[in-house]
Amino acid sequence: MRKTYEKLRDAREKLGYSQEYVARCLGVSRSTITQIELGNRKINADEIKSFCELYHLSADYLTGVEQMPSNQLVFARGFSELSEADQQEIINLIAFKREMAARQEQR
């Protein structure tokens, strides 16, 4: 099983964030991010929450309770960058696709 620090590093890289950017967002030094990503520094609950918000991850995923496919991570980042109208359009499309799948299962 992958360690939390590995998941944090992988998520940051997949999102295209630099360590410097993450450090600024979290209000810590870049060397702190380096130490966390190397597994040399433990993170507390508040830091886990901050990483989850920044990376669009769940605490369950980070702590190993659940696995998150990388395409969900990319989707979460892209979704949050859309306008509210575009987000609602995607939500409507998801609801439509679920309804169509449910109808097909009934056949």
Image (cartoon, helix red, strand yellow):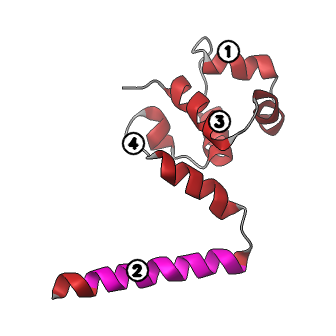
Q: Quadrant of residue 63?
A: top left
- Magenta span: predominant SS is helix
**Along the viewing direction, whichever of 96 and 51 lies nearer the viewer:** 96
Name which of mark 4 and mark 3 comes first in the sequence.
3
Classify residue 76 as left or right of residue 2. Answer: right
Task: Specify the amino acid type for callout 4.
Answer: Gln
Name which of mark 3 and mark 1 comes first in the sequence.
3
Question: Which element carries disc 4, helix, strand or loop?
Answer: loop
Q: Which residue is farthest left?
A: 107
Question: 85 above or below 63?
Answer: below
| Residue 106 belongs to the span the image colors magenta | no
Name which of mark 4 and mark 1 comes first in the sequence.
1
Q: Residues within 10 Å of mark 4 (few under 14, many from 20)?
A: few
Q: Quadrant of residue 26?
A: top right
Q: Residue at x 36, y 26 (%)?
A: 1
The dot on residue 67 is 4
Alpha carbon distance from label 4 to label 1: 24 Å
Q: Which residues are magenta?
A: 85-102
Q: Which residue is mark 1?
A: 35
Q: Which residue is mark 2?
A: 97
Q: Which residue is mark 3?
A: 12
Task: Specify the amino acid type for callout 3.
Answer: Arg
Alpha carbon distance from label 3 to label 1: 14 Å
Task: Specify the amino acid type for callout 2.
Answer: Lys
Alpha carbon distance from label 1 to label 2: 43 Å
